[in-house]
Image (cartoon, rainbow, N blue to C red):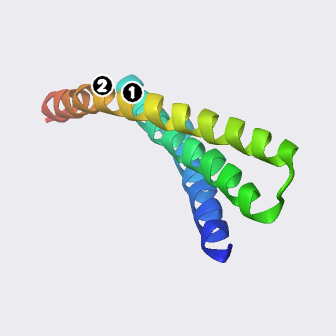
């Protein structure tokens, strides 16, 4: 399905984008926050890849591998969302603290 391929490519592009931002960031809480966003993007990539395999092939092995990919992708998305929610206020507090101390 062409729509799934577009989502796969976009999610991988977001993963690479967030990893580059992670490497360039100097703040610890912001790094963890960006890492959580990249984990979500990677999870979406893996899950969509597994879903795409279901449409391409129809063998038992494909169904098992696709199910594993979907589960791993879903778990990665879930842990990424939990980390994102945890580190978002910390990153905002860190940015506010640095803003007030620089002036």
Indicate the quadrant where residue 101 lies: top left
Report the front residue among 38 and 102: 38
Residue hosting label 2: 86
Q: Residue at 73% across / 56% down in the picture?
A: 54
Q: Is residue 36 above or below residue 10?
A: above
- Residue 22, percent across and down? 52, 38
Report the front residue among 33 and 79: 79
Q: Secondary structure at mark 2?
A: helix
Q: Residue at 19% across / 28% down in the picture?
A: 93
Q: Within 10 Å of the Cα at label 1, are there few (<14), some (14-19), or many (20+) other Cα atoms?
A: some
Left or right: residue 2 compared with residue 40: right
Total number of numbered labels? Answer: 2
- Residue 82, percent across and down? 36, 28
- Residue 68, percent across and down? 70, 35
Q: Is residue 11 above or below residue 93?
A: below
Pointers 1 and 2 in contact (C-beta within 8 Å): yes
Q: Within 10 Å of the Cα at label 2, are there few (<14), some (14-19), or many (20+) other Cα atoms?
A: some
Q: Residue at 43% across / 28% down in the picture?
A: 32
| Residue extending farthest bottom | 2
Residue hosting label 1: 83
């Amino acid at each position: 399905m062409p729509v799934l391929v577009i989502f796969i490519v976009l999610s991988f592009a977001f993963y690479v984008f967030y990893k580059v931002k992670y490497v360039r960031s100097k703040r610890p809480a912001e790094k963890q926050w960006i890492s959580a966003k990249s984990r979500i993007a990677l999870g979406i990539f893996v899950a969509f890849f597994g879903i795409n395999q279901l449409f391409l092939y129809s063998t038992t092995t494909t169904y098992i591998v696709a199910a594993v990919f979907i589960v791993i992708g879903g778990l990665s998305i879930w842990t990424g969302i939990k980390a994102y929610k945890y580190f978002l206020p910390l990153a905002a507090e860190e940015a506010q603290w640095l803003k007030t101390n620089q002036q």
